[in-house]
Image: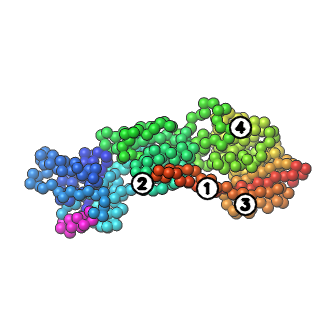
Amino acid sequence: MLEVIGTDAGGLAGLAPRSLGLVRQAQLLMAPARLLGELEPWWQAEQAAGRIPVESPCPQLLASDRPEQIVGPVEDALAAGRPAVLLASGDPLWFGIGRLLLQHFGPARLRFHPAPSSLQLAFARLGRPWQDASWISLHGRDPEPLAAALQKRPAALAVLTDPGRGGADEVRRILAASGLEAAYAFWLGERLGHPEERVQRLAPGEPVPVDCDPLHLVLLIAEPPPPPADPAALPLFGLDDGLFLQHEDRPGLMTKREVRIQLLADLELPAAGVLWDVGAGVGSVGLEALRLRPGLEGWFVEQRGGSAALIAANAERLGVQPAGIHQGRAPEALAQLPDPDRVLIGGGGRERAAVLAAVLQRLRPGGMVVIPLATLEALAELRPLLEQAGCRVAVAQHQAWRGAPLADGTRLAPLNPVLVLKGGLPRAARW
């Protein structure tokens, strides 16, 4: 039986008594190179303390960094009945050597003794429950999945870094490229479990310490972004996604910056009039429209619980004042709104055809409706309604990419493509 024992960054000093007993009995002892140098002095100290018989020779020591080189010696030891121990990092079955060992030896000849993983230790140091946390590994992997994970706005995201690709710096660059630096606390954990471990929070723009240990991970903890010091100093439009407060239960449910910019252009916002933002989510598109055109009356409709307060809070952060915010279900909630000149339909689901029909009944001459869609089926369902109403119809598909670090360069990580359906009524007629 090969005993596979997990350790934290403290190495042998952090092992439980039962695990230490297995190490003391080993005749073949394997460990990562970073631990190997301390094994022989440790063995001699244990003999001097009387915990290992003086006549017991120091076991055969092998580095396990290249698992293929230990297969033969392990097979020989198991065949001869010699006790064999392999020291691994954390939980060997969680991004560890365990998978490779199982491929070579099978579960019947292995027994695992996991230590707390770096992920567990990191959340323990922060004193934060982690049952809602997501995690992602960058070890030898393309960073694109990290950019994709951030777009879902997880409540907590642990990133197992790859120092060979940039480590924490790479995570920082991807976070900034996603426009979410203000939405996450950036925690850096180094040598977790070692007496000299270090856990610190880095402020946006604060550089990663030059002495950052290669054994580190990053925790990204979602938190409400601080309000802008001066809303008037914000960019005119195309604000970072991380500036907006989110629904806690659906934190990624908002129109991304690139799509928001396109929708604002397609709305052809007039200097005055009535704008409906139906299925407003967090209000991002409609609120940016009010920053562009302060003379517009902005009316927001969203059925999700707590949406009215959330949209109002985002409006205050951006320094704009909606004419009204209604927490209710369209199309019923539209009855209490003034007739619109511009309409953005961002939701609706199965009711979207009914919502569009209700909008077209109220849309003023020369009015315009813009609808972002995710599927071709939705386009096929809604386009005929616009055509039957006598609208000028335009369809476009938009795809955006965001730069993400790749080794010493930059690659482009795609966002989800979006179909945009646009219909405009003639000025002299009304459906």
| CA–CA distance in space, label 2 to label 3 | 40 Å
| CA–CA distance in space, label 4 to label 1 | 26 Å
Q: Is residue 317 left or right of residue 131?
A: right
Q: Is residue 409 left or right of residue 53?
A: right
At mark 2, the secondary structure is loop
How far from the left and from the top, in percent, is residue 385? Answer: 80, 59
Q: Earlier in the sequence, mark 2 or mark 3?
A: 2
At mark 1, the secondary structure is loop
How far from the left and from the top, in percent, is residue 371? Answer: 73, 53
Does residue 371 sit above or below 78 in this rendering?
A: above
Contact check, label 2 and label 3, Cβ < 8 Å = no
Q: Which residue is mark 3?
A: 379
Query: What is the crowding at mark 3: few (fewer than 14 residues within 10 Å), some, or many (at least 20)?
Result: some
Q: Which residue is mark 4?
A: 291
Q: Amino acid at mark 4?
A: Arg
Of 129 and 226, the residue lying toward us: 226
Q: Earlier in the sequence, mark 4 or mark 2?
A: 2
Q: Is residue 398 visible?
A: yes
Magenta residues, start to end: 70-81
Residue 416, numbered label: 1
| CA–CA distance in space, label 4 to label 2 | 43 Å
Q: Earlier in the sequence, mark 1 or mark 2?
A: 2
Residue at the spot x=71%, y=37% of the render?
291
Q: Mark 2 against mark 3, which lies toward the viewer?
A: 2
